[in-house]
């Protein structure tokens, strides 16, 4: 039985849309300048690594909210990026909707992202400063063939859903506060109505008005349409 058959069988019996098994990400530590000239150079090649993520396993079901909690630097962001395919794992397995997506690339990975989106922790680096808010939010819809009329209607709907006004669609990210930019990032993640949204500390950059709502507002948005979400 291959990996996909195993995941299909597991998904059918457990009803999970995301299954992460023994996920690892190790970064090699390069040898220092002096180590290269020691009498035993093979010692410097012994394999020293930074274990950013080590043997992480969990699963998420439909309409479920899952939180990965840990101190700063423990690997939460790295895990999030591996799930959505932005970082390749050292080893382990990521199953999404019954399919092994661990090593997918190109068009196959793009098709998966129709139902798998992410909200980044830093709203300043997550938005293209050359694009208007409308262009940022509509970019995923363009990639998946939405018509201009569908995109326009969906942009207005999403901006309203995250507490922004229709006229904001023609403005640039630099015209907004950090909290408003984070809401734009949330709107972009919701654009395709994905089945799973991975959120990397989604409320840390929100403005005071929305932070007070915090985890009462965000889960409502992600549950709308039977989405699941993962908070790190």
Image (cartoon, rainbow, N blue to C red):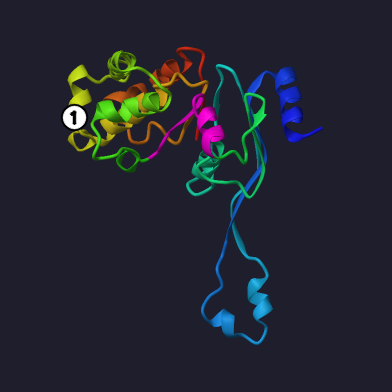
Q: Is residue 137 left or right of residue 166?
A: right
The residue at 67%/83% (across/down) is 40
Point out the stretch of residues depicted in magenta. Answer: 106-121
Q: Is residue 211 something one can see in this rendering?
A: no
* Residue 130 place in picture, x, y as percent: 23, 39
* Residue found 35% across the figure and 39% down from its top: 126
Q: Residue furthest bottom?
A: 39
**Magenta highlight on residue 115:** yes
Instruction: State the residue at coordinates (22%, 24%).
Output: 169
Q: Is residue 45 magenta?
A: no
Secondary structure beneath dot 1 equals loop
Depth check, front residue: 193 or 15: 193
Residue 82 relative to residue 185: left or right: right
Query: Which one is nearer the viewer's eye here, 144 or 34?
Result: 144
Task: Describe residue 192's horizontal placement relative to residue 84 as left or right.
Answer: left
Q: Residues within 10 Å of mark 1 (few under 14, many from 20)?
A: some
């Amino acid at each position: 039985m291959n990996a996909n058959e195993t995941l299909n069988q597991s998904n059918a019996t457990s009803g999970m849309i995301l299954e992460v098994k023994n996920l690892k990400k190790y970064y090699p530590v390069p040898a220092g300048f002096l180590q290269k000239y020691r009498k035993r150079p093979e010692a410097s090649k012994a394999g020293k690594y930074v274990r950013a993520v080590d043997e992480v396993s969990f699963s998420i079901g439909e309409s479920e909210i899952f939180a990965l909690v840990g101190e700063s630097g423990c690997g939460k962001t790295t895990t999030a990026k591996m799930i959505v395919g932005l970082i390749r794992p050292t080893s382990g397995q990521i199953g999404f909707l019954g399919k092994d997506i661990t090593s997918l690339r190109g068009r196959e990975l793009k098709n998966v992202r129709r139902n798998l989106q992410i909200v980044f922790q830093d709203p300043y680096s997550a938005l293209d400063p050359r694009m208007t808010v409308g262009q940022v939010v509509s970019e995923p819809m363009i990639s998946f063939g939405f018509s201009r009329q569908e995109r326009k209607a969906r942009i207005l709907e999403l901006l309203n859903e995250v507490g922004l006004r229709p006229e904001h669609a023609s403005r640039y990210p630099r015209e907004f506060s950090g909290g408003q930019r984070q809401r734009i990032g949330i709107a972009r993640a919701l654009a395709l109505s994905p089945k799973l949204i991975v959120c990397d500390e989604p409320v840390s950059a929100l403005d005071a008005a929305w932070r007070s709502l915090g985890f009462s507002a965000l889960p409502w948005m992600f549950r709308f349409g039977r989405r699941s979400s993962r908070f790190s």
